[in-house]
């Protein structure tokens, strides 16, 4: 029986399943327009992302005509069956760079977000409702055909399986200038057309701003009436509640099953720690932006990094099929470097999780021992068939040490760990191993994460 100090009990004799790499994706992209003249490709490789989603890539590569439908096919009056009416070169090159970072490409069809204003009023140019849904669907078919069937001097990428119809249609004007009924009709027309030509691919969407069950119910019922089913539904989350984000795929899975879409996957393809939107936008005052970005609670701080690891840990035992963190451009609010071009806690957290996926494969049982627990533990057997690994995250906890009782590692010869906290990034940590009990020592209260290595 665990003593009163035990936070978690881990049993390496009880395998619970394989680690799910597809939950560890991002919206990151290597840059064609790299104004900092720094190649971050090797750092992306260390994060070991399963895939990357193409949304907003045109924004991170200023001046480049890429990814967005209006850049690839700029004149809707032209013939979508004629390959000379498309411009693919910039998109081709950045997709090659993504593959060079060992990331599959999850392609968002449509447009990047449009934060535009003119004379003090919002004006929008690329999020307007298409005049001809059927023709727009033909253009999208041309884009998919180029990357999966070699059309228009294209490619046959076997790993470009996921194709998403639009992004955040519930974000009025900035992403869709029409109403919900118009979008649902548009979605059904496009989905039916694309599935007719590409039944082997996974086509879905529409990347809602949140898990709006009413909207999804209406969308799915319209699909059912049209005799077509999306291969996945997708939505976003910006917040700081770990349990809420971990529970959402469970709720979405239940909704899909209740409506008869048992084969439709769940996908959270933008998610990020966020306390408040105040100060996040680049137009904010310097003081406000500093408070939003820096410090333990900031967007680049230790709470953010540990939130990431807690969420990724929680998802592993749930039904989420694919996940994509909104780590986006190299720099900026959603990037992996701060205002001083130093790597953020978000970057280090993704490297820690990526390392676990690289070194381990089978999850084992980890049971919390407290009713209210800030500790999230992901324990796994190493791929070499002998050693073990463990990722331990304390999200906003106040304890000075973390005690874990472990079964099944009685013959361990050496235990070591690295720590990420407010002052340190993946440096050696103080650990004690005695009587099958692991004690991890924090440098101070608050959020911290440990990557533990057991060698036999």
Image (cartoon, rainbow, N blue to C red):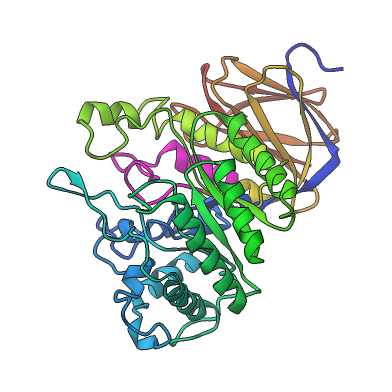
Taking the spot 73% from the left edge, 17% from the top edge, the residue there is 370
Residue 143 appears in the picture as rendered: yes
- Say which of 227 and 327 sits in front: 227
Task: From the viewer's side, name the closer residue of 333 and 75.
Answer: 75
Q: Is residue 330 above or below residue 454?
A: below
Residue drawn at x 57%, y 19% is: 397
Front residue (pair 52, 235): 235
Q: Quick one: quadrant of the C terminus?
A: top right
Secondary structure of the magenta portion, mostly?
Answer: loop
* Image spot of residue 395 (x, y percent): 56, 25
* Count of numbered circles on the image: 0
User: Per the image, is 128 magenta?
Assistant: no
Which residue is painted at 71% across and 50% down in the image? 259
Query: Looking at this rendering, what residue extends furthest in the left direction?
Result: 119
- Magenta residue span: 325-354
- Residue situated in front as seen by the camera: 217 or 21: 217
Quarter placement of the N terminus: top right
Residue 336 magenta: yes
336 lies left or right of 383 = left
Residue 157 image offset from top left, x and y in percent: 55, 76
Whether residue 354 is visible: no
Q: Position of residue 261 (x, y in %)?
A: 71, 55
As drawn, 302 above or below 382: above
In the figure, residue 61 lies in which quadrant? bottom left
- Left or right of 155 on screen, residue 66: left
Q: Compared to 367, does 192 lie above or below? A: below
The residue lying at 33 percent from left, 39 percent from top is 338
């Amino acid at each position: 029986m665990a003593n009163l100090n035990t936070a978690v009990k881990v049993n390496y004799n009880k395998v619970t399943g394989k680690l799910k790499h597809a939950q560890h994706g991002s919206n990151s992209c290597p840059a064609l327009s790299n104004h900092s003249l720094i190649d971050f490709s090797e750092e992306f490789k260390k994060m070991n992302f399963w895939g990357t989603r193409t949304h907003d890539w045109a924004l991170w590569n200023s001046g480049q005509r890429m990814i967005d439908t209006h850049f690839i096919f700029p004149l809707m009056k032209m013939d979508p069956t004629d390959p000379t009416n498309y411009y693919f070169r910039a998109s081709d090159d950045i997709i090659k760079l993504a593959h060079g970072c060992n990331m599959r490409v999850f392609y968002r069809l449509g447009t990047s977000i449009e934060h535009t204003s003119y004379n003090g009023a919002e004006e929008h140019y690329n999020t307007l409702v298409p005049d001809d849904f059927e023709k727009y669907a033909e253009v999208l078919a041309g884009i998919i055909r180029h990357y999966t069937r070699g059309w228009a001097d294209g490619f046959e990428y076997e790993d470009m399986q996921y194709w998403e119809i639009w992004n955040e249609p519930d974000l009025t004007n900035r992403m869709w200038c029409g109403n919900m009924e118009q979008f649902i009709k548009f979605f059904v027309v496009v989905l039916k057309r694309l599935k007719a030509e590409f039944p082997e691919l996974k086509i879905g969407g529409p990347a809602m701003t949140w898990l709006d069950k009413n909207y999804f119910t209406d969308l799915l019922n319209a699909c059912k009436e049209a005799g077509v089913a999306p291969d996945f539904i997708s939505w976003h989350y910006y917040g700081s509640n770990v349990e809420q984000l971990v529970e959402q795929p469970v709720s979405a899975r239940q909704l899909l099953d209740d409506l008869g879409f048992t084969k439709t996957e769940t996908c959270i393809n933008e998610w990020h720690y966020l306390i408040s939107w105040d100060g996040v936008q680049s137009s904010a005052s310097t003081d406000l932006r500093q408070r939003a970005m820096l410090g333990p609670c900031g967007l680049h701080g230790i709470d953010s990094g540990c939130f990431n690891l807690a969420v990724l840990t929680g998802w592993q035992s749930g039904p989420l099929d694919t996940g994509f963190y909104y780590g986006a451009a190299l720099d900026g609010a959603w990037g992996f470097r701060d205002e001083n071009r130093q790597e953020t806690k978000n970057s280090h957290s993704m490297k820690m999780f990526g390392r676990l996926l690289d070194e381990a494969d089978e999850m084992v049982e980890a049971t919390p021992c407290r009713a209210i627990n800030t500790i999230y533990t992901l324990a796994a057997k190493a791929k070499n068939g002998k050693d073990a690994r463990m990722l331990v995250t304390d999200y906003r906890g106040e304890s000075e040490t973390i005690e874990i009782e472990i079964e099944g590692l009685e013959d361990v010869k050496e235990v070591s760990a690295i720590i990420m906290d407010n002052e340190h990034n993946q440096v050696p940590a103080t650990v004690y191993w005695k009587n099958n009990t692991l004690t991890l020592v924090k440098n101070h209260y608050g959020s911290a994460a440990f990557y533990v290595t057991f060698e036999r």
